[in-house]
Image (cartoon, grey):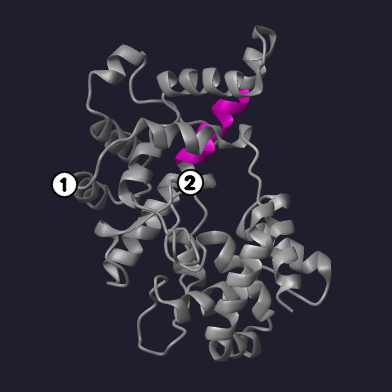
Amino acid sequence: MVGIVVAPLLWVLGTSLAPVGDRAGAVDAQPPLERALAVIRQHGVVDTSFARMLAGLSTTVFDSALVKINVTNFARKTDYTHNHNAYSVKHARLFVAEHDAMLRAAERQYGVAREAIAAILWVETKNGRYTGKNHLPSVYLSVVLSAEEAFVERNVENVMANLSADSTKRDSIRGVVQAKANKKVRWAMEQLQAMHLMHSQGRVDVTSLRGSWAGAFGLSQFLPASYVKWARDGNGDGRTDLFDVDDAIHSVANYLKENGWGPTTKERRAAVFHYNNSDPYVDAVLTLADKLK
């Protein structure tokens, strides 16, 4: 299935996203999901009727914890080294053996090492064991409020505590948190726009879609915008379902190919880094892939 590129939203939204309302008290007087819809209407990027439909689902809830983790996770270091210990290597090898034919087919079609495909599926979801339980419309509609003053201040406090920073660092940390919040609002709107496309084309039931706190879903943990651009039908059934192992294998392979996978270590690191902007993540994926050879 040919992916359709979702246009970048940075030029549409600009670099500054103010909360709806001038004071935290005025903002808080309105329910969070209504405030999220107001932000969406204000910037005119996401179809508001679609966003309102998502907000009106009985399963859609606002969760301030999603605002916190999506904005402040930069202040936490993630240890990925367990992904290439003996246990991980054993189970990733079992996956390779079970799905050898499909992995080899993807390797031939996309030119991406089957071990790298298997490594990403292990690191992301342990081959589908842990795909996430968060209602994705709730994730994005919560994160849309990240730039509200009250949430920015709470997240500044959280980052200062995580970094054990003194008061002299407050202004610089606030600047970083504000920039991160603005970026995450743009990100949430991009994902909502992609979900609208998925919904309108009948490709995925986005109303019930569940995944990680970071908004990713399926065995491969694609964001909606990544699904639209790079997901592929691996088993030829006419559907692209990232909860299906064959589709997930082909989608990961296509993602890496389209984002620079090549014969050199530099190209391979860049492709995996595009998947997750973390050098420790890249190290874990490529180390596991080498152990699977």
Helix, strand or loop for disc 2:
helix
* Mark number displayed over residue 58: 1
For marks 2 and 1, the one nearer the N-term is 1
Circle 2 sits on which residue? 187
Residue 91 is situated, as x and y percent measured from the top left of the image, at: 58, 71
Q: Main secondary structure of the magenta part?
A: helix
Helix, strand or loop for disc 1:
loop
Residue 173 is situated, as x and y percent measured from the top left of the image, at: 63, 21
Q: Amino acid at mark 2?
A: Trp
Q: Residue at x 29, y 34 (%)?
A: 38
- Is there a contact, CB below 8 Å, between mark 2 and mark 1? no
Q: Give whichever of 147, 236 is nearer the camera.
A: 236
Vertically, is 126 above or below 102?
above
49 sits to left or right of 140: left
Vertically, is 216 above or below 103?
above
Span colored in magenta: 174-185
Q: Amino acid at mark 1?
A: Ser
Image quadrant where one finds the C terminus: bottom right
Residue 57 is situated, as x and y percent measured from the top left of the image, at: 18, 48
Q: Is residue 180 magenta?
A: yes
Vertically, is 262 above or below 79?
below
